[in-house]
Image: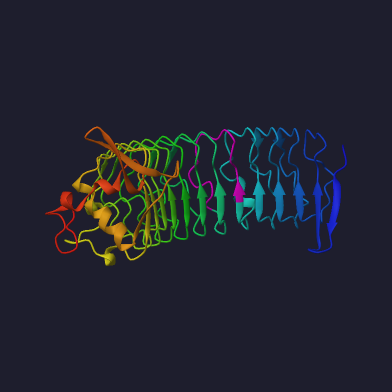
């Protein structure tokens, strides 16, 4: 058996071992007092039962970038003190249903970039202290009702770059502490209402690069802490009235690269008039890559920008002065053309009848 390199960090008083010498199995001579064990970048194909049983003081274990196909129910037995586990970038297709019962103190879990096809029900129900989990880069197809049970302390959930098509309406109901939810780059066509209703602490929600075609009223209800909402690169044609109403903390909204022809003020407010109280903080909005028509339906944006609580994001290029043909002559308008829409074209004459008092919604 090849010897691991043992080090002692006098600053942290931690013993750690790093084994990256072409190992094909977990070494049997790991030091029992090691707090950090790194087995990354080897050729390990499986974790044998009780292979870490002597590492009762170990707090950090990393076994990424190996060729692990199999983990047994008792593979993690003995790791009572473990708070960090990285088994990413392997070829795991399934995890034993009770494999995490041996590590109830776990705070960080990375199983990204494997070949997992599902999240077994109650797989994580003993991980009541877990704060971060990444399931990114697998081939998961759905999130079931009990898939995420037990994760009451979870703050970060990453499930991007999978093949998720279906999400059960109660999938996230017990994730009371969640602050960041990443569902980017999946195959989601529809989200059941109210799938996000329990996530009052979420401040970042990324559903970009999916196959959504519409946003319905009530989908984002109760997300009072939501700071950033990313819906870009979908196939959204319709956003129903009040879809973004009741989001007082929203600062960033990305809708670029969809199929929107217009964006009505009524998606933000149920008020009769546009008022800064409807959106007390500045909102940065992106709409580039949509077939939006420059007409009176966008009058509210002109007013909102003038009032200083709407700014335009430019996810692609910086934005140039808007130019249009008039009488065979090219005329350049300021300010710059943003998000494929020449806001200077939305002139006050176009808005007459719409600009009543402050402004009525459309």
Q: Relative to 214, is 202 above or below? A: below
262 sits to left or right of 166: left
Q: Quadrant of residue 192?
A: top left
Is residue 91 covered in magenta? no
Q: Quadrant of residue 59?
A: bottom right
Tell which of 177 and 58 is nearer to you. Answer: 177
Residue 185 percent coordinates (x, y): 46, 38
Q: Relative to 65, is 80 above or below? A: below
Residue 353 percent coordinates (x, y): 11, 54
Residue 143 percent coordinates (x, y): 43, 42
Which residue appears farthest toward the left when viewing the image?
Answer: 353
What kind of secondary structure does the magenta stretch mostly adopt?
Answer: loop
Total tally of numbered discs in the picture: 0
216 sits to left or right of 153: left
Q: Residue at x 64, y 51 (%)?
A: 102
Q: Relative to 90, is 219 above or below? A: below
Q: Quadrant of residue 23?
A: top right
Residue 242 in view (yes/no)? no
Tell which of 224 and 84 is nearer to you. Answer: 224
Question: Where does the N terminus fall, quadrant-wise?
Answer: top right
Residue 330 in view (yes/no)? yes
Tell which of 337 and 193 is nearer to you. Answer: 337
Q: Which residues are magenta?
A: 109-125
98 sits to left or right of 354: right
């Amino acid at each position: 058996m090849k010897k691991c390199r043992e080090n002692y960090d006098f600053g942290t008083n931690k013993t750690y071992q790093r084994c990256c010498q072409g190992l094909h199995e977990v070494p049997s001579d790991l030091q029992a007092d090691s707090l950090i064990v790194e087995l990354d970048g080897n050729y390990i194909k499986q974790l044998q039962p009780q292979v870490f049983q002597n590492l009762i003081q170990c707090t950090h274990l990393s076994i990424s970038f190996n060729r692990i196909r199999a983990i047994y129910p008792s593979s993690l037995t003995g790791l009572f003190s473990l708070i960090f586990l990285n088994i990413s970038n392997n070829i795991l297709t399934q995890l034993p249903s009770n494999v995490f019962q041996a590590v109830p103190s776990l705070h960080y879990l990375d199983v990204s970039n494997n070949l997992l096809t599902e999240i077994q029900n109650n797989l994580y129900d003993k991980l009541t202290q877990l704060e971060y989990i990444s399931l990114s880069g697998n081939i998961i197809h759905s999130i079931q009702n009990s898939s995420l049970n037990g994760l009451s302390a979870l703050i970060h959930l990453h499930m991007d770059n999978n093949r998720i098509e279906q999400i059960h309406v109660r999938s996230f109901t017990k994730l009371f502490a969640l602050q960041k939810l990443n569902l980017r780059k999946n195959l989601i066509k529809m989200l059941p209402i109210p799938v996000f209703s329990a996530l009052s602490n979420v401040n970042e929600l990324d559903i970009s690069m999916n196959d959504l075609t519409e946003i319905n009223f009530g989908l984002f209800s109760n997300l009072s802490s939501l700071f950033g909402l990313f819906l870009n690169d979908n196939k959204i044609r319709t956003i129903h009235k009040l879809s973004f109403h009741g989001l007082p903390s929203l600062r960033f909204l990305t809708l670029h690269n969809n199929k929107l022809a217009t964006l009505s003020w009524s998606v933000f407010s149920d008020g009769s008039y546009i008022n800064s109280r409807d959106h007390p903080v500045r909102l940065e909005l992106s709409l580039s890559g949509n077939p939006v028509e420059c007409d009176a339906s966008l009058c509210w944006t002109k007013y909102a920008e003038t009032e200083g609580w709407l700014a335009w994001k430019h996810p692609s290029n910086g934005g140039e002065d808007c130019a249009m043909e008039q009488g065979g002559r090219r005329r350049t308008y300021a300010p710059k053309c943003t998000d494929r829409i020449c806001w200077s074209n939305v002139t006050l004459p176009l808005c007459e009848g719409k600009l009543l008092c402050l402004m009525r919604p459309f």
